[in-house]
Amino acid sequence: MNGALCLWQLCHVSSTKLLSKSSIFYDGLYIKVASRKNANLCIRRNVQTVAYEIVNGSYIPNYLNKSPNQTKDKASSKLENLGAFQKLPMVMPSVDILYSALRKAKRVPPTQGIANIAKRERNRGAKQLDALMKELAVPLREYFENFPKKKVLHPYEQSLIELTLGDGNYEEVLGKVDGLRKKVVSVGKECASLCAKSLTKREAVERLNEGLKKLEDIFKHDGKAVDDLLNIAKTLRAMPVVDLETPTLCLVGAPNVGKSSLIRILSTGKPEVCNYPFTTRGILMGHIVSNFQHYQVTDTPGLLKRHDEDRNNLEKLTLAVLSHLPTAVLYVHDLTGECGTSPSDQFVIYKQIRDRFRDLLWLDVVSKSDLLEESPVIFITEDSDANDVEMARYRKMGPIGAIRVSVKSGEGLDQLKAKVHDMLVAQMDRIGRTESNQDNSKLPLA
Ligand SMILES: Nc1nc2c(ncn2[C@@H]2O[C@H](COP(=O)(O)OP(=O)(O)OP(=O)(O)O)[C@@H](O)[C@H]2O)c(=O)[nH]1
Ligand SMILES: [Mg+2]
């Protein structure tokens, strides 16, 4: 996916600060004591290489001052706007978490002033085990809390999660991360209290080493969940950012009909163009600036003639855009016979999609008109129901009102740009009306 068209906005805070100041360990429980007042806002590219950073995903403001239960309630009651993926926490690789935690824990000294050697040793052992448990569990807790629950996301982002990660995978990985945290806390607590009961120095050292080893083994064994989460965050963060308040044009059509070629002409987006179906394998975003106004353009994977239940995830992504984003549609038809989907099949797909998304602003284009002029008989030779007048007309001209365009000869492109502009202005009015309706509905009744 060409994600190079977007800037990612992340706010982050140093994990070392967070780990050392944000919580204290008391009898196996974590008690948050610090706030995140100093979290910085920054704009950065799509990178996931920064180790030792945990990002303050801003889903639940001030949550550190709240109990975990309060946090949960707030998170699930709030339906997020779009943009959640850009606020995902930075996840550290599991080996980094483990080795940094081990290093820090082993540096923890015993409480000062304990003269008895056995007492001092068991104090040191228990404290080091507590520290290791905390260093391991705190980042896991941060991830679990700051990765949003799927149900609070915008429906479009929910679809993206299902279609790109596989149904249930996101929740499963988050569940495993939390499971690992719970295991670390319970084993760490057990080992620390065992060590605290040691009668001799030697026993305390043994119990400390056993505990360290146990926690290390658990983390090594189940740490894959953290690495899976890191990859999920990478994938989701690379999704193009869509602004619901900016008018959006979505290019739709069968595979290989010339959608991406038109995007390259219409916008700043430079999606891949190839002569094979499903070149476009995700939702790509470009931008149009026209009369000082900024618009968004999305390229989508092609749609085939088949029932929804048979559609692949790429096609489902296209339908998710149309279903969940307030977008205007530029529907591309290729009547040359070049794209691999016959005009008759394109007609069937078109009717299905047009009927389903009747409420969206819509513009039809017939692409590759240079080829139609070179060999105007291609489409006439196609076998289809001769009695279907509408289809016969479609195969010759496309839908009523469609503009003929060619990115090769330039035919129709100026007209297309003008019509796209008018449609996006109309889309802007729609967005404005929807917003003012929403505002009015919030006013108290007289
Ligand atoms: N002759 C001619 N070829 C075109 C024109 N527009 C696109 N093509 C060619 O058609 C092929 C498919 O173009 P794309 O823009 O990749 O089509 P797409 O609809 O984005 O394809 P998918 O992403 O696979 O669904 C490429 O080989 C383009 O060079 C045109 O106006 N004239
Ligand atoms: Mg494409």
Image (cartoon, rainbow, N blue to C red):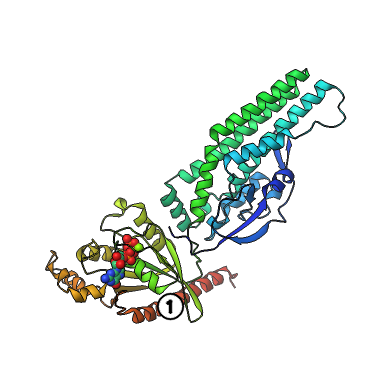
The quarter in which the C terminus is drawn is bottom right
Q: Residues within 10 Å of mark 1 (few under 14, many from 20)?
A: some
The picture places residue 234, in percent across and down from the top left corner, at 51, 51
Does 283 sit above or below residue 430? above
Q: Quadrant of residue 392?
A: bottom left
Residue 74 left/right relative to 384: right
The three-letter amino acid code for the residue at tag 1 is: Ala
> Residue 194 is drawn in which quadrant?
top right
Q: Can see residue 159?
A: yes
Return the x and y of residue 328 as percentages of the image width and height.
40, 71
State left or right for residue 172 relative to residue 123. left
- In terms of depth relative to the viewer, which is nearer, 205 or 330? 205
Secondary element at image label 1: helix
- In the image, residue 437 above or below residue 142: below
Q: Is mark 1 within 8 Å of ligand 1?
A: no
Residue 130, image x and y in percent? 71, 33
Q: Position of residue 183 (x, y in %)?
A: 60, 32
**Is 246 above or below relative to 177?**
below
Q: Which residue is mark 1?
A: 426
Res 342 quadrant in image = bottom left
Residue 355 in sight from this viewpoint: no
For this view, does 158 lie left or right of residue 77?
left
Classify the position of ligand 2 by quadrant: top left, top right, bottom left or bottom right. bottom left
Q: Along the line of sight, which residue is nearer the eye, 351 or 270?
A: 270
Image quarter hosting the N terminus? bottom left
| Closer to us: 394 or 123 | 123
Residue displayed at 59% across by 51% down: 75
Please report the residue visible at 60 percent of the width from the left and 55 percent of the height from the top: 59
How many discs appear? 1
Name the residue rendered at 67%, 53% in the picture: 13
